[in-house]
Image (cartoon, rainbow, N blue to C red):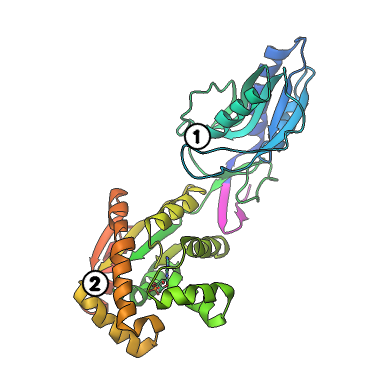
Amino acid sequence: MNKIRLHDKTFRPFIPNEQIEKAIDNVAAQLNRDYDGCSDIPVLLCVLNGSILFTAELMKRLTFNCEIVSMKLSSYVGTHSTGKTREVMGLTGSVKDKRVIIVEDIVDTGQTIVDLKKIMEEKGAKESKVCTMLLKPAVYGKNVKLDYVGMEIPNDFIVGFGLDYDELGRNYKDIYVLDTNMNYFILFGPPGAGKGTQAAAMVEKCNLCHISTGDLLRGEMAKGSELGLKAKALIEAGELVPDEIVEGMIENKFKTVTGVHGFLLDGFPRTIAQAEALDKMLDKSKEKVTAVVSLMIPDSMIKERIKHRASIEGRADDAKDETIANRIKTYHEKTEPLVEYYKRAGKYYEIDGTGTIEEVRQRISDLLDKF
Ligand code: AMP
């Protein structure tokens, strides 16, 4: 078995097909024992798309008469914890007054199972049992009985045998686990702290892809794209552009850039909401922010540094005193709370940003050696 590449990530072999088939044999034997000779016709509920392969393999082994229905759950609608609902997309047959066997590829936190059980009850099923190919016991936190479990696995990000990474990987007959341990560094600090200047050395030292949201936005402005036009007025006023715009740019880079050992985020996140969105993005592949490298300089030095940069780079938002003042204000109000956020997560590392470029570079380099 070889490693496989899906989008921007590499996965290594984890559970060979023979082991999966054996686990399915076991689950099928238990089901046959429990349902053989029953007078009713139980229904298998195939939860799309992940369970397609498991349901098919399981069904081939069942010796009692049964039906199959399938359905898909959309993702959560609304973000408030109280208002979380999931929508059913196409339950393909009736479960009314029937005994349902919910067939899942994987149970992790168990929220999907809770939702499915509730939906089955609402649709009038007589009972619903849970049959899952895989279970992550380390993260399963619900009180619902899992009646049939094929295999227990650690809390890793896996693909294959129906499971996907952004829709790829479902067709592999074996299961694979995420291979690379990518680094996600955040370069943090007030405007003018020297983030852009220091980024190049960090990128080279750790083979990172440098993502500067400011540069990306200026690129869009130069192209005159719709997004650039939207951002221009805000940037020139020293305001932040909407979270969704920068989050979309970041996610797109994560998905498309290959051949690096990680990313250096420069100018992102700039709000708590962006930091939360980043955590969510990384959590999809069970990854995390590695460290926040925070370049700190006193407020009195910020203006001086920006004026100096204006004379070299000619950025419009460096030109006016009013814009600079607003950027500093925005930084204190919206961005500085991130210090606490990352301190709480144990990821915050402060670097003295004063002194020569070389001195600061050395301090950062010493810190990076820890990761
Ligand atoms: P920078 O080059 O990082 O100083 O960014 C220049 C300007 O782009 C900022 O003052 C904001 O208007 C906008 N910008 C850059 N990154 C972000 C972000 N993460 N969120 C919102 N606005 C941003």
Q: Please indicate, yes or no, whether residue 308 appears anywhere in the rendered image.
A: yes
Residue 3 lies in the magenta-colored region: yes
Q: Which residue is mark 1?
A: 109
190 vs 53: above or below: below
Q: Disc 2 residue type? A: Gly
Q: CA distance from mark 1 to mark 2?
A: 42 Å
Q: For residue 92, what is the image quadrant?
A: top right
Residue at the spot 64% in from the left edge and 21% down from the top edge: 128
Q: For residue 99, what is the image quadrant?
A: top right
Q: Please indicate, yes or no, whether residue 212 appears anywhere in the rendered image.
A: no
Res 353 label: 2
Q: Disc 1 residue type? A: Thr
Check if mark 1's residue and mark 2's residue have beta carbons within 8 Å: no
Residue 76 lies in the magenta-colored region: no
Q: For residue 184, what is the image quadrant?
A: bottom left
Residue 28 lies left or right of residue 327; in this view the side is right
**Residue that extends furthest to the bottom in the rendered view of this protein:** 311
User: Is the residue at mark 2 in contact range of ligand 1, meaning its CB lies under 8 Å from it?
Assistant: no
279 vs 21: above or below: below
Quarter of the rendered image showing ligand 1? bottom left
Residue 296 lies left or right of residue 153; in this view the side is left
318 vs 348: above or below: below
65 vs 284: above or below: above
Residue at the spot 50% in from the left edge and 60% down from the top edge: 244
Q: Which residues are magenta?
A: 1-12
Is disc 2 surrounded by few (<14), some (14 to 19) or many (20+) residues within 10 Å? many
Residue at the spot 39% in from the left edge and 70% down from the top edge: 239
